[in-house]
Image: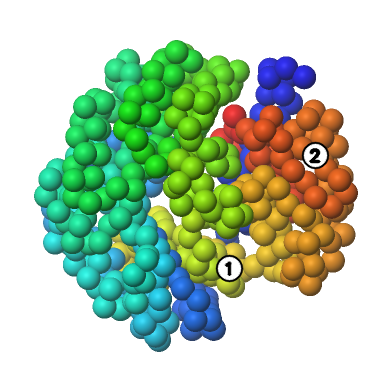
């Protein structure tokens, strides 16, 4: 079967499975009271992780699908930092102990938008209220065009030891169509500044499927990315969802590559990163140097999937802080109000800002474990997965009947208990995972997700 035939068959709208159940199935049945009760009942001494969301940027890139907006004044940035501190104190109070933290991730938007004293102040507060492990990863997302030497100093004071740099594409024609001018040189200056400050773990984000991109242009960008010597490179397919992100309507539609072109671009980038850069492919969209912790976790089958995508974080609990952030607890998922005013109103009133979520059933937990294994390891033993949770494997084996066409097309190997996604199947790993999603109904999936390729 040719690539075009595979694409025609499998390019449906499927979730990225950064959670299971996925966010569209969160409901208002989970409230701030539910969350407060769950926090008290966590009942484990296991390490936790924190995700802190800062929904501000200096500029709005036309392709952006993140929850952010342009806020340039210092006052609202400081006010927001104050809310983050309040929420962190509320969490620590509710947990009732100085819980151990193994990962702290600052995402956005552009978290470095916060004034330096706010960034360091919040990190100090976290260290006072939580026991941040000596080997904890403290990671932050950075827009290289707004990064300055004083920010690098602040990151050191915060104890940041991993930084993700947004690149997307180095081609000027592409950059002008997506409203994000960023030269290779300023990206390199940013990476050099971080390394000089002692932050050696550097990630890059690239995107294919953007206007005016071609196989040749993404290959040029991939080669430039190699020169930056990042430990990890994420390669995302552009998610064009103008009905949700209205600024994306300003992207020139007629310059967007079609699905076969997107597929070819994705493969062309993979070829450069793997063959010339020596990177190891990780799951759906990541590449890691063989000595990077992510490649090691892949090898040891300890890789996980969270709202930030692939992670080496093994903590069973992720607490979300800030507007729109999502938390994952043993009992279920919780999401904060998306808008800053709604988030502020709840926090200022002394309540958690939870507006939706989902409580996990035993069936959800089993399917979540199976889907995570498929997305991370490209492999799962369905019987072992069910037995590990003392559950009947029958529903999984029933779902596995749907593997027939994928198997016939060479995308999976299935021996009656173990399924393995082949290299040819890697771009379609979400379609494999979707077979085990009890919520997803193909007919209702259409508007919620971007296409698989
Ligand atoms: C929060 S942003 C990164 C940090 C920083 N604000 C920046 O832009 O450099 C996270 C990443 O999400 C990716 N991203 C944003 N919008 C996207 C979209 N519509 N489709 C695919 N990837 C997207 C980009 O690769 C971006 O670097
Ligand atoms: S891509 Fe980054 S800098 Fe651009 S709008 Fe989105 S979050 Fe902000």
- The residue at the point 56 percent across, 19 percent down is 264
Give residue 423's position: percent from left, percent from top.
67, 33
| In this rendering, position of residue 285 left or right of residue 398 | left
SS for callout 1: strand
Q: Is residue 62 visible?
A: no
Q: Nearer the viewer, mark 2 or mark 1?
A: 2
> Within 10 angstroms of label 2, few (less than 14), some, or many (20 or more) residues?
some
Q: Where, quadrant-wise, is the N terminus in this rendering?
A: top right
The answer to which of 339 and 430 lies nearer the viewer is: 430
- The residue at the point 39 percent across, 23 percent down is 223
Q: Residue furthest bottom?
A: 96
Comes first in the chain, label 2 or label 1: 1
274 w.r.t. 385: above or below: above
Q: Is residue 418 visible?
A: yes
Q: How is the image coloured?
A: rainbow
Alpha-carbon span between mark 2 and mark 1: 32 Å
The answer to which of 184 and 57 lies nearer the viewer is: 184
Q: Which residue is mark 1?
A: 332
Q: Where, quadrant-wise, is the C terminus in this rendering?
A: top right
Give residue 316's position: percent from left, percent from top.
54, 68
| In this rendering, position of residue 449 left or right of residue 278 | right
> Within 10 angstroms of label 1, few (less than 14), some, or many (20 or more) residues?
many
- The residue at the point 54 percent across, 53 percent down is 297
Q: Quadrant of residue 102?
A: bottom left
Q: How many marks?
A: 2
45 w.r.t. 238: above or below: below
| In this rendering, position of residue 148 left or right of residue 226 | left
Q: CB at mark 2 closer than 8 A to ligand 1?
A: no
Q: Which residue is mark 2?
A: 413
């Amino acid at each position: 079967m040719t690539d075009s035939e595979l694409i025609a068959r499998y390019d449906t709208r499927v979730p990225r499975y950064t959670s299971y159940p996925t966010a569209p199935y969160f409901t208002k049945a989970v409230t701030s009271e539910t969350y407060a009760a769950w926090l008290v009942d966590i009942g484990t001494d296991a390490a936790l992780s924190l995700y802190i969301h800062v929904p501000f940027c200096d500029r709005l890139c036309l392709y952006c699908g993140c929850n952010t907006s342009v806020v340039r004044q210092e006052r609202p940035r400081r006010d927001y930092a104050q809310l983050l501190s309040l929420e962190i104190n509320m969490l620590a109070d509710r947990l009732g102990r100085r819980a151990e933290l193994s990962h702290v991730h600052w995402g956005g938007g552009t978290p470095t938008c916060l004034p330096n004293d706010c960034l360091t102040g919040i990190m100090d507060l976290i260290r006072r209220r939580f026991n941040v492990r000596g080997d904890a990863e403290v990671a932050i997302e950075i827009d290289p065009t707004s990064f300055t030497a004083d920010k690098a100093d602040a990151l050191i004071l915060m104890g940041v030891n991993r930084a993700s740099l947004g690149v997307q594409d180095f081609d000027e024609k592409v950059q002008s169509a997506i409203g994000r001018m960023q030269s290779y040189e300023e990206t390199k200056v940013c990476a050099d500044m971080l390394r000089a400050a002692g932050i050696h773990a550097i990630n890059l984000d690239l995107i294919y499927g953007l206007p005016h991109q071609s196989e040749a242009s993404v290959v040029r960008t991939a080669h430039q990315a190699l020169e930056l010597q990042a430990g990890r490179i994420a390669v995302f397919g552009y998610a064009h969802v103008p009905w949700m992100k209205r600024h994306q309507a300003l992207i020139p539609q007629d310059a967007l590559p079609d699905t076969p072109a997107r597929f070819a671009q994705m493969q062309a980038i993979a070829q450069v990163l793997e063959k010339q850069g020596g990177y190891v492919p990780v799951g759906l969209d990541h590449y890691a140097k063989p000595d990077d912790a992510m490649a090691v976790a892949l090898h040891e089958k300890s890789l996980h999937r969270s709202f930030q995508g692939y992670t080496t974080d093994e903590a069973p609990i992720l607490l979300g802080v800030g507007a729109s952030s999502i938390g994952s607890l043993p009992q279920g998922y919780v999401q904060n109000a998306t808008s800053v005013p709604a988030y502020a109103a709840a926090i200022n009133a002394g309540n958690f800002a939870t507006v939706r979520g989902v409580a996990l059933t035993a069936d959800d937990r089993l399917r979540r474990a199976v889907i995570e294994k498929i997305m991370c390891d490209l492999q799962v033993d369905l019987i072992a997965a069910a037995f590990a949770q003392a559950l009947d494997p029958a529903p999984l084996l029933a779902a596995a009947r749907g593997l027939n066409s994928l198997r016939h097309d060479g995308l999976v190997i299935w021996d009656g208990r173990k399924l393995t996604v082949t290299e040819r199947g890697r771009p379609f790993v979400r379609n494999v995972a979707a077979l085990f999603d009890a919520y997803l109904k193909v007919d209702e999936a259409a508007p919620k997700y971007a296409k698989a390729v």
